[in-house]
Image (tube, helix red, strand yellow):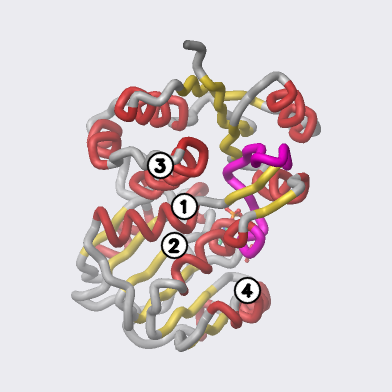
Amino acid sequence: MTNDLYAVVGHPISHSKSPWIHSHFARQTGEPVEYTAIQAPLEGFEQTVRDFFAGGGKGLNVTVPFKEQAWAMADHRTARAEKAGAANTLYQDDQGRLTADNTDGAGLVADLTDNHGFSLVGERLLVLGAGGAVRGVLGPLLAQGPAQVVIANRTPDKAGRLAELFAAEAGDTRLQGCGFDQLSGRFDLIINGTSASLQGELPPLPAGLVGPGTSGYDMMYGQEVTPFNRWLLDQGGRLGIDGLGMLVEQAAEAFAVWRGVHPKTAPVIAALRSGAS
Ligand code: ATR
């Protein structure tokens, strides 16, 4: 039997852990999946996608900097992708339409709730950043029913606009956007969705946001504790979680979208933590 072909597309792509993760899922589930990495030229993303599907490819993951282009070129979008404004998963549906999905928010929520035992119901959440990464996870976070979600951003207007965009999804959750200097009071969970960690920087946060019961989640990950998680622990926070679990969970969710089988993620996360890939 020949394998069905999948890939991740990005630029650059050589560092991607997705081929390793999906190959592990394929072995674990027995699904006939072959998964590679494709570096698309910066000006050639759409053509790369069209060539891949024309050549019989079954599904793509999409990463930086192409997630918005993947969303824009799709013939059809799932509801969660529509709201996210970006797509990390592409496939052809049974009518042959290029379909865009976004599994990032589901991945974050799965990591928080399944792997770390959080319940977000009634919690006070602070989300740092108002770019594509945050927009991609807000819908699934709000669906968990927190009491409050504050979006804080270096450019406060962007946080305000994002809060307006998701007002309809907020339900009973108090949702607001602001600048860092307008923040006050303690939060139960602070999620860092800024790209500041990439530059080894920390958003300029006021004191008093972190108490002994506050947890942090950095959507970034690396070999070392991220600057954000280091800050949270230095402020006396309970726990600082990095985004490795989210990476594996969004991959598992994409695998389930394509294959109808949801792989187990715990062994994959454990292997990556111990240096595999
Ligand atoms: P992504 O797709 O990763 O979200 P993005 O859309 O460029 O990328 O958004 C990056 C986010 O990180 C923004 O919220 C940005 O703040 P601005 O909207 O004010 O630009 C935030 N960010 C980047 N570098 C930062 C830094 N050094 N300190 C604080 N926030 C930062």
Alpha carbon distance from label 2 to label 4? 16 Å
Q: Does residue 112 appear to the left or right of 32 in the view shown?
A: left
Q: Is residue 162 left or right of residue 204?
A: right
Q: Nearer the viewer, residue 168 or 242?
A: 168
Labelled pair 2, 4 in contact (Cβ < 8 Å): no
Q: Quadrant of residue 131?
A: bottom right
Residue of label 4: 162
Q: Along the polypeptide, which appears first: circle 4 or circle 3? A: 4
The reply to whether discs 3 and 1 touch (Cβ–Cβ < 8 Å) is: no
Q: Residue at x 72, y 51 (%)?
A: 76
142 versus 46 height, above or below: below
Q: Nearer the viewer, mark 3 or mark 1?
A: 3
Label 4 and label 3: CA atoms lie apart by 27 Å
Looking at the rendering, in which quadrant would you find the C terminus? top left
Numbered label attached to residue 197: 1
Where does the magenta region start and end? 82-97
Q: Is 89 within the magenta?
A: yes
Question: Which label lies toward us, 4 or 1?
Answer: 4
Assess whether residue 12 is covered by the magenta stretch: no
Residue for badge 2? 192
Q: CA distance from mark 4 to mark 1?
A: 21 Å
User: What residue is shown with label 3?
Assistant: 252
Q: Residue furthest top?
A: 1
Q: CA distance from mark 2 to mark 1?
A: 9 Å
